Image: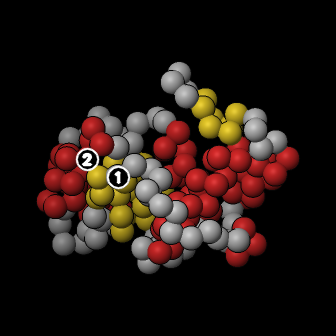
Amino acid sequence: MSEISSLLHHHAERQPSKAAVLTAERSITYAELDASVTCLAGYFLDRGLRPGDRVAVHWSNSIETVQLLLAAFRVGLVAVPVNLRLKLAEIAYIFEHSGARICFSEPALAALAEEASATAGPKSSARCRRSRATPPQCPRSIPHNRL
């Protein structure tokens, strides 16, 4: 488990109901954030991702972005942030040259990310999903000492 992930878990145990991330529209507590990060970390592992693999994140500044980044760190993945202002060819270039195995894109940007994934060259293995940051059902829970 990464140091940042350990800090999140520590705060979730000590201050579970305190706000961890605030936006203009909503907030998430440390306990909720830690649980969603654990869920996403399990999702990544269930998809066959292993430490050192890359995960592209094509998402605006949001709670979901924080969840995705922290989940990637929790299981030793490398997050590849993709700037929202990039054009199709630039996104495809990042997908191809970063080696991202999977991409998460917010719904408003999903079509662009999916097209970039489809047009990326032969080196690319990124397959973008039209997805929310948290899968509909948590595939499994991962003990923190295992990460």
Can residue 15 be seen in this snapshot? yes
Residue 71 lies, in percent from the top left, at 56, 58
Q: Residues within 10 Å of mark 1 (few under 14, many from 20)?
A: some
Q: Three-letter amino acid code at disc 1?
A: Ser
Earlier along the polypeptide chain: callout 2 or callout 1? 2
Quadrant of residue 55 within the rendered picture:
bottom left
Q: Three-letter amino acid code at disc 2?
A: Ala
Which residue is labeled 2 in the image? 110
The residue under the point 34% across, 48% down is: 105
What is the secondary structure assignment of the residue under circle 1?
Answer: loop
Horizontal relation, residue 81 to residue 3: left or right: left
Quadrant of residue 75 within the rendered picture:
bottom right
In the figure, 140 relative to 27: above or below?
below
Which residue is labeled 1 in the image? 131
Residue 91 lies, in percent from the top left, at 25, 50
In the figure, 123 relative to 135: above or below?
below
Can residue 72 be seen in this snapshot? no
